[in-house]
Image (cartoon, helix red, strand yellow):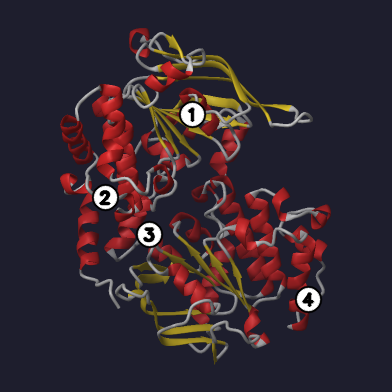
């Protein structure tokens, strides 16, 4: 896949804690994201999906494998300023309550993104344009993050990261802190904005039902490994791996029929599979 | 609002909320009084799960807290909450603490904060039993072990000696459920009991709640924003918005034939009902094949 913008090959990330055995959070993951493509990475807590997000934007150091963005290896963030070309990877974090600076106005935080975007050859969209694109009003630019609801804050965080004109957007559980009625709407908006700008997106979530709406391809992770990978409809309608099947069977359907979610027979199978994977690295 | 409850002899053991109104005034002279709940009416019947749905800030949690007399300082409740012939809103602190945990119990959203991190599970499971039921340490531990078995925790006897951090999120929530059920309450308020859990774990806890409700014949109030969860285990659904009930009725009717525009909006916003433009998807996958 030469068309890939983000190329991850056999990535390993191990957390070392003094006095404890090493914990292998990611153990040999390969994935690609092409320009204009939305890749969904799905898994439950502790499966390593957030570690991948953090490694791609340089917050964690890989202990093995390769991580290339437009052909050059991604360097972990350090004391030195990062090459500006690598600022074309932007990230949207899970919790918009922590990812925005509480002491600066929304407008000034978005203009940071715009300034970076201009240096990287971005368009000349203004703060108001960005507020408009994410469904907020021009007068919101003068307010501070605390006066917004969770959904509005996440819109601001999305506007800020996209204003920096990224080629790759990493979204780590961007919707899980939001009300259910907003989740699909925000995810939809992210897909639209990312595709308009021609960027690629790695969308990480535990919610297969939402990822399905916006991803072109889905990767399912379990205990640091990718257990299933394929085009969205294929993963959704014909899951091959028992774990993916269990994930799908566990989603409660709002059909009003009182169907209890879950599949006990699959659970046993998955537990058996999981037991075979060691946790120590 | 009237509920279609005909069997009055059974509702006596449940809980009846009517005209519940909660007002809140922040400390300070200039603070204005705000109404958080407007005339909320809800009947909880034994063996039934009554779901309360709504977005954050709709007052669903506030309703649960009012039942237990756990409203934040500055909040005032009027109206009526009747349990077993008693008026809970009039009850003094002493009789309320005799009811709370014994007759009306609560399951909170996040088991990692609702369990005490420095006390063994055994202590947390027996404290209130010994106080409310007046049983000895040995009998309480015996019952605690049975409770853990009931919520499907392996090695129940060993689990009693452990601390909360030694369990996964799903197991902690099962323990929290066991604690809530320890004194054989007639009413259980479950406030977003599965929101903090993974979907595969959630499935197990939902099955457990449904089974316990059927077996123990408790009246359960299930507060959740997730209509999927609602559809899986609730018998009746009440939809709240800005402190008011906008719609209530049997699960199937509310979810498949919603009457109120707000309920319709909630249902329309569900992921399954918002499939992205199919053309856009096709174009994207065609591009992928080219790559």
The residue sitting at 33% across, 24% down in the picture is: B102
Q: Earlier in the sequence, mark 4 or mark 2?
A: 4
Q: Label 3: chain?
A: A
> Who is closer to the viewer here, A184 or B150?
B150
What residue is pinned by disc 4?
A: A115
Q: Is residue B223 above or below residue A186?
A: above
Q: Position of residue B172 (x, y in %)?
A: 33, 47
Q: Label 2: chain?
A: A
What residue is pinned by disc 1?
A: B64
- Residue A260 visible in the snapshot: no
Give the label, 2 or 1, closer to the camera.
1
Q: Is residue B93 above or below residue A151?
A: above
- Residue A237 visible in the snapshot: yes
Callout 2: few (<14), some (14-19), or many (20+) C-alpha neighbours within 10 Å? Answer: some
Badge 3 marks a residue whose secondary structure is helix
Q: Which mark is residue B219?
A: none
CA gap, disc 4 and disc 2: 51 Å
CA gap, disc 4 and disc 1: 48 Å
Q: Which mark is residue A237?
A: 3
């Amino acid at each position: 896949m030469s068309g890939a913008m983000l190329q991850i090959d056999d990535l390993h990330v191990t957390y070392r804690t003094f006095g404890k055995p090493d914990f292998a959070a990611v153990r040999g993951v390969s994935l690609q994201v092409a320009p204009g493509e939305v890749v969904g990475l799905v898994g439950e807590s502790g499966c390593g999906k957030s570690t991948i997000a953090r490694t791609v934007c340089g917050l964690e150091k890989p202990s093995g494998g390769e991580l290339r963005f437009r052909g050059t290896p991604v360097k972990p963030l350090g004391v030195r300023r990062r090459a500006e070309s690598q600022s074309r990877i932007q990230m949207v974090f899970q919790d918009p309550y922590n990812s925005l600076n509480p002491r600066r106005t929304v407008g000034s935080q978005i203009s940071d993104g715009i300034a970076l975007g201009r240096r990287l050859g971005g368009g000349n969209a203004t703060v108001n344009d960005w507020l408009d694109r994410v469904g907020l009003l021009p007068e919101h630019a003068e307010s501070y993050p605390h006066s917004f609801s969770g959904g509005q804050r996440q819109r601001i965080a999305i506007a800020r990261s996209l204003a920096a004109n990224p080629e790759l957007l990493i979204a780590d559980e961007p919707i899980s802190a939001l009300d259910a009625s907003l989740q699909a709407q925000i995810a939809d908006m992210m897909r639209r904005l990312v595709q308009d700008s021609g960027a690629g997106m790695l969308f990480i979530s535990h919610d297969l039902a939402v990822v399905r709406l916006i991803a072109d391809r889905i990767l399912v992770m379990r205990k640091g490994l990718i257990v299933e990978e394929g085009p969205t409809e294929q993963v959704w309608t014909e899951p091959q791996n028992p774990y993916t099947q269990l994930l799908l069977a566990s989603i409660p359907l709002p059909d009003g029929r009182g169907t209890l979610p879950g599949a006990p027979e699959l659970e046993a199978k998955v537990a058996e599979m999981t037991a075979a994977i060691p946790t120590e690295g | 609002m009237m509920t279609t409850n005909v069997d009055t002899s059974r509702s006596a053991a449940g809980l009846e909320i009517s005209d519940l109104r909660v007002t809140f005034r922040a400390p300070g002279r200039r603070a204005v009084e705000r109404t958080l709940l407007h005339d909320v009416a809800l009947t909880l019947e034994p063996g039934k799960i009554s779901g309360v749905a709504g977005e954050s800030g709709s007052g669903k949690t506030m309703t649960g807290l009012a039942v237990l007399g756990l409203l934040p300082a500055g909040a005032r409740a009027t109206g009526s909450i009747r349990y077993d012939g008693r008026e809970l809103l009039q009850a003094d602190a002493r009789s309320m603490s005799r009811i709370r945990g014994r007759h009306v119990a609560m399951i909170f959203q996040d088991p990692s904060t609702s369990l005490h991190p420095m006390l063994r599970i055994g202590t947390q499971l027996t404290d209130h039993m010994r106080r409310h039921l007046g049983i000895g340490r040995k009998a309480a531990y015996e019952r605690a072990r049975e409770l853990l078995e009931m919520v499907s925790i392996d090695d129940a006897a060993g689990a009693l000696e452990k601390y909360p951090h030694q369990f996964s999120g799903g197991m902690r929530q099962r323990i929290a459920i066991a604690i809530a059920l320890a004194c054989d309450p007639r009413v259980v308020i479950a406030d977003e009991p599965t929101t903090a859990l993974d979907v595969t774990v959630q499935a197990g806890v939902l099955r457990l709640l449904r089974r316990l409700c059927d077996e123990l014949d408790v009246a359960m109030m299930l507060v959740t924003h997730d209509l999927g969860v609602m559809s899986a285990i609730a018998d009746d659904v009440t939809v709240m918005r800005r402190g008011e009930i906008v719609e209530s009725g049997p699960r199937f009717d509310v979810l498949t034939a919603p009457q109120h525009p707000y309920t319709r909006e909630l249902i329309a916003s569900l992921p399954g009902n918002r499939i992205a433009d199919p053309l856009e998807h096709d174009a994207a996958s065609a591009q992928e094949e080219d790559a």
